[in-house]
Amino acid sequence: MSEYIKALREQLEKMVVPMGYQVQRRTAKSLRIVKGADTVMTITDRGEIVEIVLQGKSYNYDKWYTSPERLATVITNFFSQRS
């Protein structure tokens, strides 16, 4: 598992699991966030960027400017607005 994805997973488990979501490893460089049987978000490490696929749209974040902690906060804010 890439170091970035590993750190992001640790942060997300603290932040989104209490909201009823599950963080699952998809591949060595990919995670998905699941609620029930539905995959809500896919997060993939693509080298220098992290790609988030959400509701059919792709969003790219530069890994060197966006720490795992900051990205976890952005993702958590999205889910807290959905609830």
Image: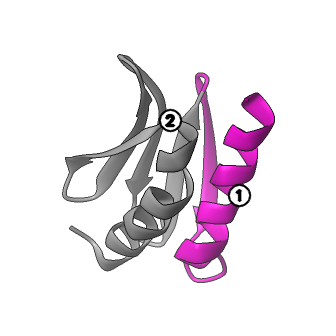
Task: Indicate whether residue 70 is drawn in magenta.
Answer: yes
* Image quarter of residue 82: top right
Q: What x and y, as percent, mark residue 26?
A: 24, 43
**Nearer-the-camera pick, 2 or 79:** 79
Numbered range of the magenta stretch: 55-83
User: Which residue: 73% across, 29% down?
Assistant: 83
Kind of residue indicated by mark 2: Gly
Q: Is residue 35 above or below residue 4?
A: above
Kind of residue indicated by mark 1: Val
Labels 1 and 2: the sequence-earlier one? 2
Residue 20: mark: 2
User: Which residue: 48% across, 68% down?
Assistant: 11
Q: What x and y, as percent, mark residue 55?
A: 61, 23
Q: Is residue 26 above or below residue 44?
A: above
**Nearer-the-camera pick, 43 or 46:** 43
**Nearer-the-camera pick, 46 or 21:** 21
User: Which residue: 58% across, 22% down?
Assistant: 56
Q: Is residue 72 above or below residue 20?
A: below
User: Which residue: 31% across, 78% down?
Assistant: 3
Mark nearer the viewer, 1 or 2: 2
- 69 vs 24, left or right, is right
User: Badge 1: how crowded within 10 Å, few (<14), some, or many (20+)?
Assistant: few
Residue wearing tag 1: 74
